[in-house]
Image (cartoon, grey):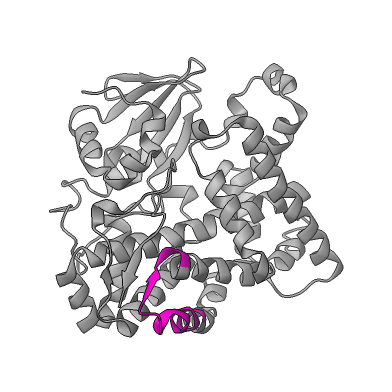
Amino acid sequence: MPDYTLADFGTPAFNQNPFPIWEQLRQNEPLYRMDLPDGSHAWMITHYDDILAISKDPRFIRDAKKLVPEEVRENMPPSVAAVRRMLGQQMMNADPPEHTRLRQLVSKAFTPRMVEQLRGRIQQITDELLDRVEAHGQMDLIADFAFLLPVTVICEMLGVPVEDRDKFRVWSSFLVKPREEQSQMEFLTILNGFIDYIKALLEEKRSYPDEKLLSRLIRVEEAGDKLSQDELISMAFLLLVAGYETTVNLIGNGSLALLLHPQQMRKLQKEPALIVNAVEELLRYSAPITLTQRWANEDVELHGKHIARGDAVYLALMAANHEPAHFPNPEELDLAREPNEHLAFGKGLHFCLGAPLARLEGQIALQTLLRRFPNLHLTVKPEELKWRASLGFRGLQALPVAF
């Protein structure tokens, strides 16, 4: 079997067709060990049951700071230490009790009811975006639609000026690239630009509060507890980047999957009530998130192998979603598939808080797209499509279509 490095799981070539490699690992090395440049090790986990168990196992943590010796932290350059401190404040990088506290506070401002109230506005934005391209008879489904819908929604939710949305595309595209493709200086420059923007925005919201999500997060309080400045910056980072990155890829990957399976696409057009099931199957079949990460907080024996304290553990959600033991005929796109307990949004304490919003946007976007443009089709060969370089996210650079 070939030797894989961590970088191999984020290349455009891998993202174009990752399924044979996932199948190979699942059958031959479901706990695949990789050597990292710093001398440590990482593990790629591909079995559904293992991923589910690790997601709920307190021995595997999200907060890597707990594993970095104090002397190493003290020797970090101030710019690196400051960035690590801020990003370490977000829910996705925290463990209980910090994670529990943050999630309780944020949940007060980011409720399912609040998401459902956005339905009408999401539909309006969707219609407006499709109105813009209808007369042209063609579009880049990513740039003209899949990107603009969620970034407009999340900017409006948070109270970010819509004219700044292109900045977030540049920031997000850079920050989700594999770290091997960028220098530490480049990464810090981009990230600090993002942080400076969020700081200025938070200061504006303090001076001129409104009813948008950032202002609500500033005001939110539980038993005298509030979000600190670093926690607010980190939460804004999480919501703005992860909050729209997932949905861009859900709409783009989902549209491509339908275009490559015209029988299923016609089925959805004829049975629009199938949209809820359809989005769940598209999340399983062509997941927008490929990997999530944990660290072993103590030595763990798993399937006869030794995972040492401090080892990084990557949970291959997409591989689990194509495991035949859990999903019969996994390479078949079946929009009516039930049950469909996929792991596209993770499981356990760190289940994606924004999942209801991503689902709602995906349902409205795809249903409206197929209703408005029933003759939607690709204008290039599938093998000519370009995939983004990203470790953890899977998405297209562009998706040229006509209608």
222 or 93: nearer the eye? 93
Quarter residue 340 falls in: bottom left
Residue at position x 23%, y 43% in the image: 19
- On the question of residue 228 being in view, the answer is no
227 or 21: nearer the eye? 21
The rendered magenta stretch, by its main secondary structure, is classed as: helix
Left/right placement of residue 105 relative to residue 343 reads: right
Left/right placement of residue 282 relative to residue 295 reads: left
- On the question of residue 343 being in view, the answer is yes
Q: Residue furthest top?
A: 39
Position of residue 324 measured from the top left corner of the image (x, y, whole percent): 16, 47
132 part of magenta stretch: yes
For the C terminus, which image quadrant? Answer: bottom left
Residue at position x 80%, y 57% in the image: 200
Position of residue 69 measured from the top left corner of the image (x, y, whole percent): 64, 19
Position of residue 80 measured from the top left corner of the image (x, y, whole percent): 70, 31
Quarter residue 35 falls in: top left
Position of residue 371 measured from the top left corner of the image (x, y, whole percent): 31, 84
Residue at position x 69%, y 72% in the image: 212
Residue at position x 62%, y 64% in the image: 165
In the rendered view, tell whether residue 285 sits above or below residue 14. below
106 part of magenta stretch: no
In the rendered view, tell whether residue 280 sits above or below residue 185. below
For the N terminus, which image quadrant? Answer: top left
Report the magenta residues as a range: 125-143
Left/right placement of residue 75 relative to residue 344 reads: right
